[in-house]
Image (tube, helix red, strand yellow):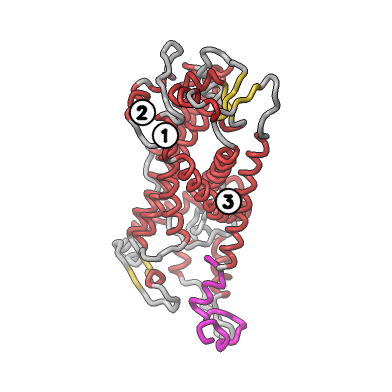
Amino acid sequence: MAARIAGVVAAVILAILFGMVVYKSSGAKPIVLPTNGVTAGGKADDPAGIAALPELKSRTQMQTWPGNQTKPAEPSTGTSRALAPSLGGQQGGEQLVQQWSQDRNANGDILQDPRMLRGHATIPGDERAVLVQPQGRTWRDVHNNKLAYGGGIYIFGVSLLIALFLALRGRIPLEQGESGVSIERFSPLERANHWLTAASFIAMALTGIVVLYGKALIRPWLGAAAYSSLAQFSAWSHTTFAVPFVIGVLVMLILWVRQNLPERNDWNWLKQAGGFLNDSTEKPPARRFNAGQKIVFWAVALVGLFLAATGLQLMLPFYGLGYTGMETVQALHSAAGLMMIGVIIGHIYIGTIGMVGAFQAMWSGFVDRNWMREHHALWYRTLEARPDSIRRWDRKAEPAPTSPVMTFAAGLFVAVLAAIAATYAYQHLNVGSAQANSRDNPSLILGQDATQSPLRR
């Protein structure tokens, strides 16, 4: 009864959140405000506000080449026109666009038709010479609207369905009760690798949400300075925890791929929904992994490797791809990540509160003999036919064969250690660092003899 009450409460909260996201997504399409990257430290970007003018002027003076005594030119009336309407923020930006639109002839340089514009850049790389790329508007619409709202609708929708299922069905019980004798289901290595993969994915999911939603949802109340630190930490953590996640997925494939191959019996399990819909239905027989677990396995394996491949491309931008390719990869990476979050929410539910006795399988490695008979009858019969291969545990008379905390801590430790090692490797290789940029353009190294630049040695 307590589980059902919790399901009702969760369903009400999730229904409200789901409705809010749907309502926001169905509103008028937000206008894309002009921006110059100057924020003046506010809680939200306000490049159209008066407070941004001093910062823009200071930034312009910093770009003056050392030794040049020419006084920097004051911002033109065009710059003032672009940055200082009577109002700031979203309202000021919309007012600014309306003012431009009233006199298209005078503002033709701003309201020109979208087209690809290229210039000249001293920094190597064709993409650095692109000044305007109209396809960025399509990407921004996908990123800010379709992915942002679609992801919210999907995640809250999946969570709402799970909460309703819990409220109506309650926990899936153990029909015959516990026998007191448990059988090993997962070895310490399998459990430690599971926690390694799980911890890495949760870290990437949380930091990925910060990257995707942080500017719109977190920065307004956290402030620009604090959010900047959070965003930087999230970006680094998202990248570094990808290493232990990929390691975990590869080990998982080695350990379980043969036992997760589809077979005819899986279709029968799916047709009966695993016997989870009511207590009177007999559970369809399954081997070590039933059809539902196989779906989760292949989702984690295939989508996980896809996330790794697209993530690697994002870490090495413009290697073989232009702007359109990079924008497509970023959108696909975000969509796949959001899809995985929904799958894992369902996996966590059924493995914890959703089914009595399921959590012990991955925590202690052992499950009750009656639980094994009900949910994995074919595998249980296989083990019974080979008694010497069964590792039993009498929970009433014997201590746990292996410490659940130790296997959990081992997986977590390896995940953190691999992430730290990845951070060191990235920094040592100067991935995305100022030193790497200076190698591309040694003329920008101030205070260093040009003859000592890496390209002149």
Residue type, numbered disc 2: Asp
- How packed mark 3 is, by other alpha carbons closer than 10 Å (few <14, some 14-19, many 20 or more), is some
Label at residue 266: 2
The answer to whether the residue labelled 2 contacts the one labelled 1, judged by CB atoms less than 8 Å apart, is: yes
Quarter of the image where the C terminus is located? bottom right
For label 2, the SS is helix
Above or below, comparing residue 110 to residue 187 in the picture: below
Residue 96 position within the rendered picture, expressed as x and y whole percent measured from the top left = 42, 56
| Lower sequence index among marks 3 and 2 | 3
Residue type, numbered disc 1: Lys
The part of the image, by quadrant, that contains residue 34 is bottom left
Residue type, numbered disc 3: Lys
**Foreground residue among 63 and 8:** 8
In this rendering, position of residue 254 left or right of residue 191 = left
Taking the spot 65% from the left edge, 34% from the top edge, the residue there is: 404
Residue interval drawn in magenta: 430-457
- How packed mark 1 is, by other alpha carbons closer than 10 Å (few <14, some 14-19, many 20 or more), is some
Is residue 44 shown to the viewer in this render? Answer: no
- How packed mark 2 is, by other alpha carbons closer than 10 Å (few <14, some 14-19, many 20 or more), is many
Q: CA distance from mark 2 to mark 1?
A: 9 Å
Q: Mark 3 — residue?
A: 43
